[in-house]
Amino acid sequence: MMKYRLINGLKDGLFVFIGVVLVVIFLNYTGFNFGHNRIWSGLGNLELINIFEDKELNGLLVLSVVLGAIAFSIGFYSNSNDKKSKDFTRE
């Protein structure tokens, strides 16, 4: 059961992370200027990730790591497939 929970959490977290990374790569490739977002700019100013020249894109990558970690924890701790929840559906 623990193995299934870990795989489910990794699947959810990686789905969110890879999805946002693909959006960031697309925005960098097209050169689309989406304006100055306070959250992405603030995260980009922390300089935790310095891949792109644009600080907003780096901030969006940091945000994707945070959202991926949240999605992992929700997927890991969700107990929708536990034995107890299946027992309630039989009634």
Image: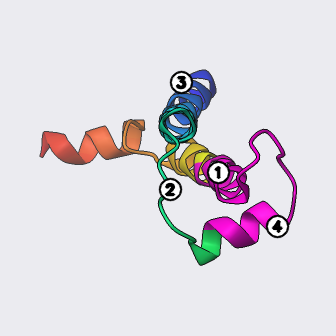
* Residue 18: quarter of image: top right
Mark 2 or mark 4: name the one nearer the start of the chain: 2
Tag 4 or tag 3, which sits nearer the N-term?
Answer: 3
Q: Residue furthest left?
A: 91
- Magenta span main SS: helix
Which of discs 3 and 1 lies nearer the camera? The answer is 1
Q: Which residues are magenta?
A: 40-67
Label pair 2/1, CB-CB below 8 angstroms: no
Q: Nearer the viewer, mark 2 or mark 4?
A: 2
On the image, numbered disc 2 is attached to which residue?
A: 33
**Residue drawn 57% across the image and 39% down it:** 28
- The residue identified by callout 4 is 45
Between the C-alphas of marks 1 and 4, the distance is: 11 Å
Is disc 3 surrounded by few (<14), some (14 to 19) or many (20+) residues within 10 Å?
Answer: few
Q: Secondary structure at mark 3?
A: helix
Q: Nearer the viewer, residue 67 or 8?
A: 67
Q: Amino acid at mark 4?
A: Asn
30 sits left or right of 77 in the view: left
Q: In the figure, 77 relative to 28: above or below?
A: below
Residue 46 part of the magenta-drawn span: yes
Mark found first going from the N terminus, 3 or 2: 3
Q: Which mark is residue 13?
A: none
Q: Is residue 32 left or right of residue 90?
A: right
Q: Distance of mark 2 from mark 4, alpha carbons?
A: 18 Å
Residue behind mark 1: 57
Q: Nearer the viewer, residue 20 or 53?
A: 53
Identify the residue shown where x is 57% and y is 32%: 14
Q: Amino acid at mark 1?
A: Leu
Q: Element type at marker 4?
A: helix
Q: How far apart are the alpha carbons under marks 3 and 1?
A: 34 Å
Image spot of residue 62 (x, y percent): 71, 52
Residue 4 numbered mark, or none: 3
